[in-house]
Amino acid sequence: MELLKIEKFWSLINDKLESWLEAGIKHLPNFIVAILIAITFSIIARIAGKAMKKVLLKTLESPQIANLLASIFKMCVLIAGIFIALDFLGLTGTVTSLLAGAGIVGLAIGFAFQDMTENLIAGIAMGIRKPFQIGDVVEADKVFGTVKTINLRNTLVETFFGQLEVIPNKILFRNILTNYSTSGFRRIEIPVGISYADDPEKAAEVIVEQINQYDFVIKKQETAVFAKDFGDSSINLLLWFWIAYPGETGFMQARHQAVIGVKKALENADILIPFPIRTLDFGAKGGVKLNSMLKANSITNNNKTSDTAPSNEST
């Protein structure tokens, strides 16, 4: 009995191996063609990846983004070749299962690394849009400074206080971003106060003439002074002028020289920059000043003293 069982077992194995061998020989040409397809697509993916990388390096400023996009393109071409090879072998069900599994895995990874994925996608989008470049002065989400490094997940900005701020790319992509280096110039606004006794038009002429003498001032025809409002102790003016930015003369240095120049020019023109003045008015409807009130009180007190003094009449 045991001998019969062993013979039956080996007979089943032999039949199975023969069927596999026959199927393998039958599908051998398809298998060879599938391997050739996979090899061909592998070569095509390598060549296409290198070509795509060269194009992206010329188009994009970030080599990291260019390498990533080229690698993704290369991988897509290679995966397409593998799927075509499997389909050529008649493994359509396997291809469908692989696609479904890849979708599920991708969805799970997307949820698990949502923040990282969002920063990565934002970095790629900014690499294509180019809202700023290395060396630009930008302001976003309370960070103001010079861009030092642009990565796939974050951007490094050096503030004017010397600190390096690491900003996730999604913040730069979502929020309002101000790039001060795009236009190549920047306007400086300086408030100036003059006394009510001076002429605002004359002060404006003096200030504009002084500011336009500086070499760092550009668009000199647009240098202007406007009357802003009436202050407690002064008529408030607003000076506008343009500088090249970034330029040889920085923003702070240009504003520093402008403030000093305006002060000297107004002094030479005998125009007063007043300090805060307080006038005490004790009248119910206004008009009675402190010195007038003190004088009136002094006269009243003297009269009262004269009336109440004892008389020294001789008897």
Image (spheres, rainbow, N blue to C red):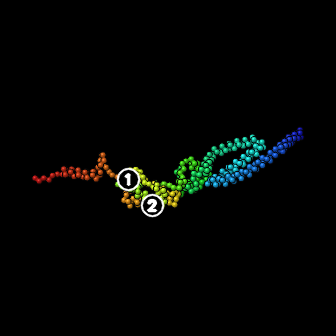
Disc 2 versus disc 1: distance between alpha carbons?
26 Å
Question: Residue 309, position in %: x, y?
Answer: 18, 51
SS at badge 2: loop
Say whether residue 248 is visible: yes
Image quadrant where residue 110 sits:
top right
Residue at point 75%, 41% (across, down): 92
**Side (left or right) of 230 relative to 283:** right
Question: Residue 139, position in %: x, y?
Answer: 53, 52
Residue furthest out toward the left: 315
Residue furthest out toward the front: 221
Residue at point 62%, 53% (across, down): 60
* 160 in relation to 119, above or below: below
Q: Residues within 10 Å of mark 1 (few under 14, many from 20)?
A: many
The residue labelled by disc 2 is 213
The residue labelled by disc 1 is 234
Residue type highlighted by circle 1: Ser
Residue at point 49%, 60% (across, down): 216
Say whether residue 160 is visible: no
Residue type highlighted by circle 2: Gln
SS at badge 1: loop
Residue at point 64%, 55% (across, down): 58
Question: Residue 287, position in %: x, y?
Answer: 29, 49
Residue furthest out toward the top: 1
Q: Residues within 10 Å of mark 2 (few under 14, many from 20)?
A: few
Front-most of 294 and 31?
31
Mark 2 vs 1, N-terminal side = 2
* 15 in relation to 186, above or below: above
**Side (left or right) of 31 relative to 243:** right
* 73 in relation to 11, above or below: below
Image quadrant where residue 9 sits:
top right
The disc label shown at residue 214, or none: none
